[in-house]
Each structure stands twice: as structure tokens, then as C-alpha cells.
Image (cartoon, rainbow, N blue to C red):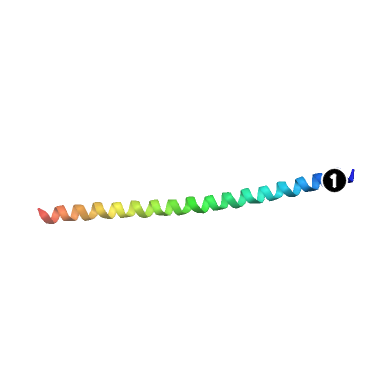
């Protein structure tokens, strides 16, 4: 019975460690996704500014 308890305890510890690792990985992935979203927003804003500059340039040429 003690042997079974030891095995179960060891399995529980290993499972908890795996769950903690998965949670850390998910958190890291979430941070990366947030960074990508921020970069996409910056790129979108830059594109918008370029379009405005093009429009201003074309108006000045007329």
C-alpha cells in the first residue's frame, strides 16, 4: 500500500509540474501574441500616415 501511495504521490507531483509548465508556456505565448498585436497596430498606423502623406503630396503637386 505504501508503494502505491509513493507512486501516486510521484505521479501527482509530475502532473503538477507539467501543468505549471503548460501554464507558463501559455502565459509566454499570450505575451508574444500581445506583442504581435502591438506591432500590427504600429504597422497599421504607419500605413495610414503614409497614405496621408501621399495624399498631401498629390494635393501639393496640383
Left or right of 10 in this view: 42? left
Q: How many marks?
A: 1
Q: Residue furthest left?
A: 62
The residue tagged 1 is 5
Near-viewer residue (37 or 4): 4
Q: Residue furthest right?
A: 1
Q: Quadrant of residue 49?
A: bottom left
Rate crowding at label 1 as few (under 14), some (14 to 19) or many (20 or more) other CA atoms within 10 Å: few
x, y percent for residue 29: 53, 50
In the rendered structure, the answer to whether residue 50 lies left or right of residue 41 reads: left
Q: Position of residue 56 (x, y in %)?
A: 18, 55
Which element type, helix, strand or loop, lies under badge 1? helix
| Residue 11: % across, % down | 76, 45
Q: Residue at x 90, y 43 (%)?
A: 1
Specify whether 4 is left or right of 61. right
Is residue 37 shown left or right of residue 15?
A: left
Q: Residue at x 29, y 51 (%)?
A: 47
The residue drawn where x is 51% and y is 54% is: 31
**Location of residue 4 with respect to 49 vertically, above or below:** above
7, above or below 62, in the image: above
Asked whether 14 or 58 is in front, the reply is 14
Q: Position of residue 18 (x, y in %)?
A: 67, 48
Residue closer to the observer: 3 or 51: 3
Q: Relative to the observer, which residue lies in front, 29 or 56?
A: 29
Amino acid at each position: 500500500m505504501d508503494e502505491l501511495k509513493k507512486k501516486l504521490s510521484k505521479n501527482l507531483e509530475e502532473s503538477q509540474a507539467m501543468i505549471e509548465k503548460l501554464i507558463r508556456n501559455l502565459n509566454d505565448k499570450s505575451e508574444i501574441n500581445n506583442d504581435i498585436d502591438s506591432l500590427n497596430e504600429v504597422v497599421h498606423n504607419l500605413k495610414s500616415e503614409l497614405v496621408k502623406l501621399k495624399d498631401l503630396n498629390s494635393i501639393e503637386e496640383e
